[in-house]
Each structure stands twice: as structure tokens, then as C-alpha cells.
Amino acid sequence: MGHEDAVYLAKLAEQAERYEEMVENMKIVASEDRDLTVEERNLLSVAYKNVIGARRASWRIVTSIEQKEESKGNSTQVTLIKEYRNKIEAELAKICEDILEVLDKHLIPSAKSGESKVFYHKMKGDYHRYLAEFAVGDKRKDSADKSLEAYKAATEVAQTELPPTHPIRLGLALNFSVFYYEILNSPDQACHLAKQAFDDAIAELDTLSEESYKDSTLIMQLLRDNLTLWTSSEAEPPAGGNAEAAPQEEAKAAEPAAEEAKAAE
């Protein structure tokens, strides 16, 4: 299939909400070993975000039910739920490993612009974080380590090549802070990172371009929402994924940075 056809079919699949097919079409485009256009990059991101998002939502619901049944001592139901949860986790792992392979083999080596480099390293951090959400033991530590490494690589480029108001830089700070809170159980570090990103953006609001104004201000609001949630909560940070009061990640959209709307999601 040709490049233009693959992009067109990906857009068609998005309209039809057939995201698995959208993923397959965008994988063809992403495997061409060149720097993708902004539109192509966002189509790829939206495709995987929808495919993974549905499973993450399912996992949180099933995990919550499992905890309730365990507290009631319903061992028969708990056994069934565990098997079902394992099935969802296998799907999650397959999706994450799939996009991580595309990132490592094609997208990151082919990235030319600072914007692309930040976008892909952030994406790598996100999908290792999704693996860490349900993994245990050494697997969890390995995913968390790789996520941290990717977020740090993205941050290094973002701080030198993107303004503080850039939606991709803000989205990175948002998701990196969620990683500190949810995965590393470091609320102080999460708050520091989120506040720094918010304050830096506020200080340079005059650099905000018209086309990214909506995206940037949305993510700034999410950063502020998380800071409010994290600083007002006396509760301990969640040990895995908290199915109830989840911090905000990025919104899901075809814009440069907004992918995840309410997350940790």
C-alpha cells in the first residue's frame, strides 16, 4: 500500500472509530524511516492512544471490582477476575511493545526536529509507564526505569529547543509529573515538576502562538488541576493505578500535544 493511501485509510478508520485498523495503517507510514509530518505524527499518536486507552479503562474497572470481591472474601469470583485481568494485561503489553518497537526502530532514529524528538521520547516514556501500571516485581522496575530514562531524554531536548509555552513541552511535563506521582510514588517531585512547568509557561505567555493557544492553555489547566489534587490530598500516593481519583494526563486529540484527556491514567 502506498503512503498516501495509508494516511487516507488511517483518517477514514479514525472517523469510523476503528482504531485497531488506524494503528495498522499508521504503522505502515511510521516504518518508512523518515521524520513524519505533524499530521502523521498526531494520527499515529491518536490511533495508539485510543487502542491503549480502552484497555487501560477496562483494567482499572476490573481491578476495582477485584479489590471489592477480595474484601468480601469471594475467592471463586476473585479467581475468575484475575484470569480476566491477566487477559487484559496481555493485550496492554502487546500494544505497548508494538509501539515501543516502532519508536525504537524507526521514529526516534529518524527524528530531525527538536519537536519530533521530544514527541517521540515522551511517547516512549508514556508507553513504558503504561506497562509499569500493571507490571509487578522486576518487570515493573524495568518499565519504570525505561520510562524515566525516556522522559528525561525528552525533557533535555524540550528545555533547549522548545519554549515553555509549547504544547508538547507542557504535555511532557504533565505526563512526567503523573509518572512521578503514580509510578514512583513521589508526590513532592510530581508537584515540583508540574509547578515549575506551569510557572515557566505563565512567565512567557507572550510567546504563546495563536495556533497552539488552545492546546497550551488546556494543558496548563490540567497541570493546575493536578497540583490542586495532589496538594489538597492527605492520602498516600497510590501504589499502582488509582481507579478513583486519577490525576489528569493529556487530552486525546489530533492536536500536537493533547492526547490523553483525563487519565492515569
Image: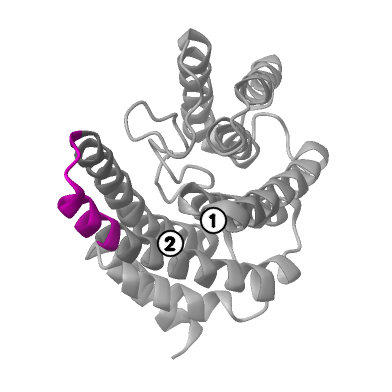
Mark on residue 48?
A: 2
Which quarter of the image is occupied by the C terminus?
Answer: top left
Q: Name the kind of residue labelled 1 in the image.
A: Tyr
Q: Residue at x 56, y 30 (%)?
A: 181
Question: At 24% across and 62% down in the image, what residue appears?
Answer: 17
Among the two numbered marks 1 and 2 on one chain, the one whose residue lies closer to the N terminus: 2
Query: Disc 1 to disc 2, how far (Cα)?
Result: 10 Å
State which region is magenta. 72-83
- Residue topped by disc 1: 127
Task: Tell me, yes or no, whether the two marked residues, 1 and 2, touch with CB atoms within 8 Å.
Answer: yes
Q: Is residue 82 magenta?
A: yes
Q: Position of residue 103 (x, y in %)?
A: 63, 67
Q: In the rendered view, would you say 250 is above or below 80?
A: above
Residue type at tag 2: Tyr
Assign the magenta stretch its main secondary structure.
Answer: helix
Q: How far across and how far down the image is residue 72, in percent?
A: 18, 35
Query: Is residue 222 located in the magenta-colored stretch of the structure?
Result: no
